[in-house]
Amino acid sequence: MRCSCGKEVYFTRIYEGTNLCKICFVRSIEKKVKKAIRLNKMLERGDRVAVALSGGKDSSAALYILNQIVKQRPDMEIFAISIDEGIGPYRIKTIRKSAALCRKLGVKHHVYSFKKEFGSPLPKLLKLNPRLNACTYCGVLRRDLLNRKARNLGATKLAFGFNLNDEAESVLLNFMFGNIGKFTRLGPVLKTENIKKFVPRLKPLREIPEEELFAYCDAVKIPYYSRKICPVGKESVRKSIRKCLHEMEEKYPGTLFQIVKFADVIIPPLRKHFENKGKVIYCSVCGEPASKELCKACELLRKN
Ligand code: SF4
Ligand code: ZN
């Protein structure tokens, strides 16, 4: 079997029934991502784009492709932010890979740690509050830090490497738990114009399946860390959904796309219906956007 251009096949897209050589595959990924950026108006004149870079394949690919666009635009800037949660050699290695990619691309790299910003690394914070799920704790603090630092560095957009699998998992997860607030915050772009301190979030890779991002990073030789998973994150509902969706996709190719497509149809009217029309609240301790008197990060830290 050959690619339609005649070259040897590098990747087979089962859900599309296409066989692609390395060059056609790379081109098709970049074309899809750039189209999603354009159609969803992710970038605007004068944007300063911060990329949340973990050192894994997803955020590394997001930085790589966004950098291709931004470097053609003299009015735009791009930089990367990595968060060191203090989770040992795993994070040290991923941050090394992030730094290597930023050097290769000539992109400025900023690193912030839980230890410096919240007083202790994640495992220590968790010991003080063992009933909490590690990923919930970690996710809230990381998002808080990323938003704060991106804003302080003058970012007008904050881009994440969420892929198609992540988005489909989030759709099902929030649906299962009836979390309408979080559900309506899904989608390619999250802007909350009435909340000044919130940097709009972008998900340029949201239509790209996880396995294609592995193949893309390998094809264009992006340095990323893939060997070991986080030593702190434990079994969670999200992981169970991930396994289940993996099986469904194997049996019924295209399942992930259908889930995300369905969410795309129902999210805009739901957003309109449920959007927060009340007064914007800012945390009484740190001043960051909040849904009640204390933001989620201060609430978690206070419990310690
Ligand atoms: Fe944090 Fe969980 Fe990710 Fe580990 S797996 S870095 S604990 S969110
Ligand atoms: Zn706060």
Image: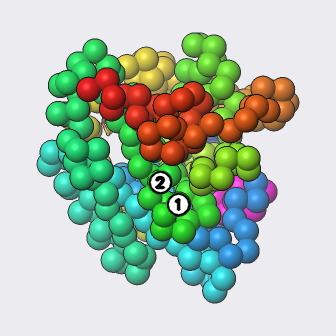
Q: Count residues near mark 1 (Cα–Cα under 10 Å), then give few for <14, some for 14-19, many for 20+.
A: some
Q: Is residue 205 above or below residue 272?
A: below
Camera-nearest residue between 292 and 257:
292
Spatial distance from mark 1 to mark 2, Cα to Cα? 5 Å
- Left or right: residue 178 compared with residue 53: right
User: In the rendered view, does 131 fall on the left or right side of 81?
Assistant: left
- In the image shown, does 144 or 99 lie closer to the viewer? 144
Is label 2 in a helix, a strand or a loop? helix
The amino acid type of the residue labelled 1 equals Arg
Residue 151, numbered circle: 1
Q: Residues within 10 Å of mark 2 (few under 14, many from 20)?
A: some
- Up the image or down, 230 lies above or below 27; here it is above
Q: How many marks?
A: 2
Q: Residue at x 50, y 52 (%)?
A: 147
Mark 1 and mark 2 residues within 8 Å of each other at the beta carbon: yes
Residue positioned 14% across, 48% down in the render: 89
Residue 68 point in image, percent of width and height = 56, 74
Q: Which residue is mark 2?
A: 148
Task: Please give the name of the residue rendered at 29% of the width and 44% of the height, measured from the top-left corner.
Answer: 118
Q: Is residue 295 magenta?
A: no
The quadrant of the picture occupied by the C terminus is top left
Q: Is residue 52 above or below residue 235?
A: below
Per the rendered image, the range of residues in magenta is 32-39
Q: Amino acid at mark 2?
A: Arg
Q: Is residue 103 left or right of residue 105?
A: left
33 inside magenta stretch:
yes
**Viewer-proximal residue among 260 and 41:** 41
